[in-house]
Image (spheres, rainbow, N blue to C red):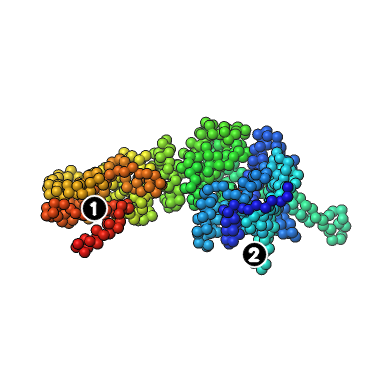
Amino acid sequence: MSAQTKTFQTEVSQLLDLVIHSLYSNKEIFLRELISNASDAIDRARFAAVSDSGIEEPAGGWKIKLIPDAEAKTLTIVDNGIGMNAEDLEANIGTIANSGTKAFLKELAAAEAADRPELIGQFGVGFYASFMVADQVELVTRKAGEDQAWKWTSSGDGTYEVEEAEREAFGTSITLHLKQEEGDEDAETEDFTQEYKLRQIVKQYSDYIAFPVVMDVTRKEKDEEASEEGEDPVYRDVTEEETLNSMKAIWTRNKSEVEEEEYNQFYKGAFHDYEDPQEVIHWRAEGTTEFTGMLFLPSKAPFDLFYNEEAKGLHLYVKRVFIMNDCKELLPSYLRFVRGVVDSSDLNLNVSREILQNNPLVRRIGKNVTSKVLSTLKTMQSKQPEEYAKFWAEFGRVLKEGMHVDFANKDKISHLLRFESSKTEAGETVNLKDYLDRMQPEQKEIYYLTGESREVVENSPLLEAFRKKDLEVLFLTDTIDEWVIPALTEYEEKPLKAIHRGQVDLDSEEEKQEKEEKRKEDEDLYKPVLEALKASLGDKIKDVRLSDRLTDSASVLVADDSGIDANMERMMKAMGQVAPEVKRTLELNPEHAVMAKMKAMVEAEGSLDEYGELLYDQALLTEGSPLQNPALFAQRVSNLMAGV
Ligand code: ADP
């Protein structure tokens, strides 16, 4: 077969373009990415070898070799891992299948040029990072168990070539033709064929890699035979393969013996992150289930956290032998931002993916991991509130999903929830415990209001009575809150109460008695108004009544105690769902001047003309709902202004 030229999937071209043209300050990470891929490939080959698939460990042992050539200006990275066949090449290198990646690319293309390097870093471009330092990349690979090898070549310009090739044994060799930029100030420091440079990069980024990363190192050694006594010694070149990394799986060491920097480098290398993790959780579980966990809470949410609801999962090892990446069984979906490693001494080395899915041992480890993460977050919230606030801003939305899906841990998760409130500055949050601590002495319920944004809920007329009584109301403005709160009916025996639903009861017995008389009077007084409104609004509403919640505004719409409210309706529509039509109650403020005006109007004319429609539309606007006919509303307001 002659060489075939193929075109990269559009997204890959876009990505390459960004990688090549965005100034990336930290080019040397290309090596970390390639070594990490090589190590994954060896992990898979080794797993195949222990699972008795006919694949055998290579004679010289599993390893990754760096071959720099200063004259040719190339660097070759050779591994004896699983390799790829033609289909694998096409699927893995040349295509981006992941929808989250595609979405990320859109975001990247839209970002300011100056912000791109950081975004790319967060993403971890993997193999494509080669093109940051190379203007041509050749990859020769042979899949374990197959005879045919393949050569893949590209200069990152939109196309690549694939042709048949030869390779003695299975594995992959990637040769980078390093960019030679004339007048490049960094030429000296960025010479990736220099021994010291490669040593330094491997030590810094890939020290923990479990397989030897080797390089031929030539030393001058005194040639004892050729050197004569009394004369200058004669030296000869001795070349030896040297291992550049310590290969220590850091999770097997004691926490007290691991430096923070080692954790950071491991994390960034193994999970392709650009930033240090926010928190490391490293522990040894003993007792019925024995395993070591080393988990990381990232500093920044990955770009696909919301596109991809499946847990990425943890890397699973059994007695230090790698079993699989991204083992989903070890983490519930609402902890999908947690990265890390679990090394079990109880599981069998031969476990297959299918067995893992229904394995009680794995489930037990998963439970233990979940508890550990939740308890770490709890401590973080109380001991390092600022750190926790950062964590919450990144991952709170995902953690909240747990309220809905993890019944057993609901209680623990409820302590971790944070909300903005009528007593916090925008962007600041309280938890339910803080709320309870500063509740009014007679207050029996925890009040909340849902809505599209802080701005909308903050200006809601529904808050008026609460403000007046200095009662704190939680603002639930996250889409997910509508699903979380039903799972949380009470906290520390205090029920949660939506202030936009049903009736609210804010008055003391005394106040109630005082108000009762006034209420009766008002009801008698405004009976004709309420009736006229009911008649004119007809089907749009369920009922019209006088309100206890308003002090300044004229009207507000309230939902029933259960069923769909305005915010849910908005969200369902946004998701393309048909929201069932649910009528709400229009409440009127008996103290508002408009009431007397309407009463006079009903008495004089027997109807309310368009006032009812106006009040109703106003109530819709203040809660952030769209009007059915905005033009008509504008016309009515104009008419009113003109006194028509
Ligand atoms: P990632 O490693 O994040 O999946 P990459 O773009 O780096 O993304 O690699 C894409 C895929 O190509 C890998 O998932 C793997 O299947 C394959 N691959 C890359 N490098 C190697 C290698 N040295 N040996 C075998 N397969 C590889």
The image quadrant that residue 577 belongs to is: top left
User: Residue at point 42% right, 43% down?
Assistant: 401
Using residue 270 as the reference point, say whether residue 431 is left or right of it: left
* Residue 131: x %, y % from top left: 63, 57
Q: Residue at label 1?
A: 613
For the residues labelled 1 and 2, the Cα–Cα distance comes to 71 Å
- Whether disc 2's CB lies below 8 Å from ligand 1 is answered no
* Residue 408: x %, y % from top left: 42, 35
Q: Nearer the viewer, mark 1 or mark 2?
A: 1
User: Disc 2 marks which amino acid?
Assistant: Asp
**Label for residue 590?**
none
* Residue 387: x %, y % from top left: 45, 51
Residue 446 visible from this viewpoint: no
How many residues crowd around disc 1 within 10 Å: few (fewer than 14), some, or many (20 or more)? some
Using residue 35 as the reference point, say whether residue 614 is left or right of it: left
User: Disc 1 marks which amino acid?
Assistant: Glu
* Residue 295: x %, y % from top left: 53, 44
User: Residue at point 50% right, 61% down?
Assistant: 112
Using residue 468 as the reference point, say whether residue 191 is left or right of it: right
How many residues crowd around disc 2 within 10 Å: few (fewer than 14), some, or many (20 or more)? few
**Label for residue 186?**
2
The image quadrant that residue 228 belongs to is: bottom right
Q: Quadrant of the C terminus?
A: bottom left
User: Residue at point 68% right, 59% down?
Assistant: 178
Residue 168 visible from this viewpoint: yes
Of 407 and 93, nearer the camera is 93
